[in-house]
């Protein structure tokens, strides 16, 4: 994947693999801890009193957002809302169109792969080997392998069938919402006409 002078030595690979394993274990433990909080009775309802993990430290109240990565809950007033799509009017638009990342998880986002690849190309021009460059190469290889696995999974028959079903269901819900809106407007118009 990379030129020989950027080859990562075995000790660095072992250290990176160990750090990668610890990172996975840490996020799994955090998610498990956050998902084990006592949830409200309704789907999407925030945890019960005393269980909230919001930055402010206050108890659950009002609209709450759940982080897609760490699965912890935050007051909507303490964090910025995710960008909403144009299809806000559809039923269940939140589940389909937006993913909320809390401020702590947002900080852990990695740069785009194209930027990293350009940095690796620039590293080729340096006459020395940097440990940071070797770590960057390991991260890049990890990202490329993940992309390849994700592409294969998304192209599988099971996933494409489910995506087709989801698209069809979404269209049916949209059509039903349009029909209901038209019917409601019609009833409102005829009711207003009868009152006159």
Image (cartoon, rainbow, N blue to C red):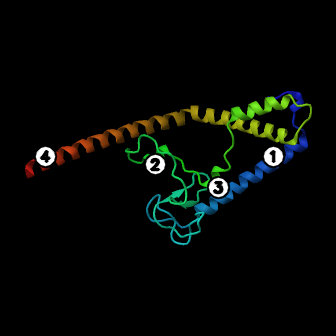
Residue at 84 percent across and 42 percent down: it is 132
Mark carried by residue 148:
none
Residue at 71 percent across and 34 percent down: it is 115
Residue at 72 percent across and 51 percent down: it is 24
Residue holding disc 1? 17
Give residue 104's position: percent from left, percent from top: 64, 55
Looking at the image, tell me whether mark 1 or mark 4 is earlier in sequence order.
1
In this rendering, the label closer to the viewer, 2 or 4: 4
- Cα separation, mark 3 vs mark 2, equals 21 Å
Looking at the image, tell me whether mark 4 or mark 3 is earlier in sequence order.
3
Q: Which of the 4 image quarters holds residue 103?
A: bottom right
Q: In terms of secondary structure, where does tag 2 sit? A: helix
In this rendering, the label closer to the viewer, 3 or 2: 3
The local crowd at label 1, few if under 14, some if 14 to 19, many if 20 or more residues have their Cα within 10 Å, is few
**As drawn, 76 above or below 12:** below
Say whether marks 2 and 4 touch (CB < 8 Å). Answer: no
Residue holding disc 2? 94
Say which of 33 and 185 sits in front: 185
Residue holding disc 3? 104
Looking at the image, tell me whether mark 1 or mark 3 is earlier in sequence order.
1
In this rendering, the label closer to the viewer, 2 or 1: 2
Residue farthest toward the bottom in the current orientation of the protein: 50
Q: In terms of secondary structure, where does tag 1 sit? A: helix
Q: Which of the 4 image quarters holds residue 181?
A: top left
Q: In terms of secondary structure, where does tag 4 sit? A: helix
Mark carried by residue 190:
4
Residue at 51 percent across and 57 percent down: it is 65
- Cα separation, mark 1 vs mark 4, equals 69 Å
- Cα separation, mark 2 vs mark 4, equals 33 Å
Say which of 111 and 150 sits in front: 111
- Cα separation, mark 2 vs mark 1, equals 36 Å
């Amino acid at each position: 994947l990379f030129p020989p002078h950027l080859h990562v030595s075995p000790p660095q690979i072992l250290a990176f693999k160990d750090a990668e394993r610890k990172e996975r274990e840490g996020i799994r433990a955090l998610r498990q801890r956050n998902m084990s909080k006592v949830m409200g009775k309704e789907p999407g309802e925030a945890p019960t009193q005393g269980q909230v993990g919001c930055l402010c430290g206050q108890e659950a109240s009002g609209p709450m957002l759940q982080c897609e990565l760490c699965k912890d809950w935050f007051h909507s007033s303490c964090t910025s809302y995710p960008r909403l799509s144009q299809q806000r009017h559809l039923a269940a638009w939140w589940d389909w169109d937006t993913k909320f990342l809390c401020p702590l998880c947002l900080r852990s986002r990695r740069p785009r792969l194209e930027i990293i690849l350009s940095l690796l190309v620039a590293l080729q021009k340096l006459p020395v080997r940097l440990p940071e460059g070797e770590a960057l190469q390991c991260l890049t290889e990890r990202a490329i392998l993940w992309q390849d696995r994700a592409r294969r999974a998304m192209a599988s028959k099971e996933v494409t069938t489910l995506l087709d079903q989801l698209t069809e269901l979404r269209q049916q819900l949209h059509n039903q919402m349009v029909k209901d809106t038209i019917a409601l407007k019609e009833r409102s118009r005829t009711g207003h006409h009868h009152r006159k």
